[in-house]
Image (cartoon, rainbow, N blue to C red):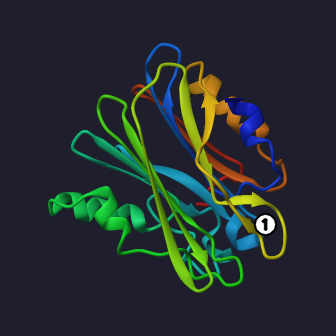
């Protein structure tokens, strides 16, 4: 089990990442961050939307292609919180509304079509008790591999899944199971552990929710 700061900072480009679990006080922990190498990817901020979250162009005049960068990373359905790295957040939400499941929703989706990287789609759902599921949809020889993981709440522990193993061209996709991490501190403390570990040039935005407290950090300022 790794320290959260060390796990996040283990590579210069983990891409987009999700952390889920519980801190030492048993409070639920959810976090999501985005990074970017291109001007278009870096030109983003997180904006709170009710209990959820959306991405928005920091400077709309610089927005080139919104297809894979503008979406709702966080949505809440009843007592469940959904966190993903793309518009599959809406796919999961709509499936739950219709009586479906996290798994059935993601079986209708694939990795992102951003050849040659084929960025994995990572997703998480957490219930009111702090139990959670994670998933990653990956490209493999022209097919989609779908992996699902289910975890019960454990005080002081959680899991970290991210899109990329390391920087490169193409970028190497995440490998293996979600990484087990230690979780401690309130929303401010966990936000700083993650934000300070992210590569300074590539980090873009961070969302952290611990219990009922939410923190959002954006590198860029919103142009109004």
Residue 83 visible (yes or no): yes
At x 38%, y 66%, the residue is: 106
Closer to us: 62 or 16:
16
Residue 53 visible (yes or no): no
At x 72%, y 41%, the residue is: 8
Q: At which x and y percent is residue 23?
A: 52, 21
At x 67%, y 59%, the residue is: 174
At x 83%, y 48%, the residue is: 200
Residue furthest to the left in view is: 99
Task: Say whether residue 56 is left or right of residue 102.
Answer: right
Q: How many marks?
A: 1
Q: At which x and y percent is residue 180?
A: 61, 35
Q: Quadrant of the N terminus?
A: top right
SS at badge 1: loop
Q: Quadrant of the C terminus?
A: bottom right
Task: Say whether residue 77 is left or right of residue 179.
Answer: left
Closer to us: 195 or 12:
12
Disc 1 residue crowd, few under 14, some 14–19, many 20+, Cα 10 Å: some
Residue under circle 1? 37
Q: At which x and y percent is residue 123?
A: 47, 56
Classify 160 as above or below 92: above
Residue furthest to the top in view is: 25
Task: Say whether residue 168 is left or right of residue 50.
Answer: right
Q: At which x and y percent is residue 194?
A: 69, 36
């Amino acid at each position: 089990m790794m320290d959260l700061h060390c796990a996040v900072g283990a590579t210069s480009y983990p891409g987009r990442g999700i952390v889920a679990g519980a801190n030492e006080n048993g409070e639920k922990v959810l976090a999501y961050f985005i990074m970017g190498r291109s001007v278009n990817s870096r030109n983003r901020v997180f904006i709170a939307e009710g209990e959820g979250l959306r991405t928005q162009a920091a400077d709309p005049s610089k927005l080139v292609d919104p297809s894979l960068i503008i979406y709702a990373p966080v949505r809440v359905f009843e007592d469940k919180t959904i966190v993903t790295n793309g518009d599959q957040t809406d796919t999961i939400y709509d499936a739950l509304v219709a009586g479906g499941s996290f798994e059935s929703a993601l079986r209708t989706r694939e990795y992102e079509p951003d050849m040659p990287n084929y960025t994995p789609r990572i997703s998480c759902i957490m219930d009111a008790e702090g139990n959670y599921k994670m998933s990653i949809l990956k490209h493999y020889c022209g097919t989609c591999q779908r992996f699902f993981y289910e975890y019960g709440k454990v005080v002081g522990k959680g899991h970290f899944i991210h899109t990329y193993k390391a920087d490169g061209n193409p970028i190497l996709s995440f490998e293996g199971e979600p990484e087990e991490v230690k979780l401690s501190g309130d929303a401010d403390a966990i936000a700083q552990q993650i934000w300070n570990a992210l590569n300074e040039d590539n980090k873009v935005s961070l969302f952290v929710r611990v219990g009922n407290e939410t923190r959002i950090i954006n590198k860029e300022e919103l142009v109004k």
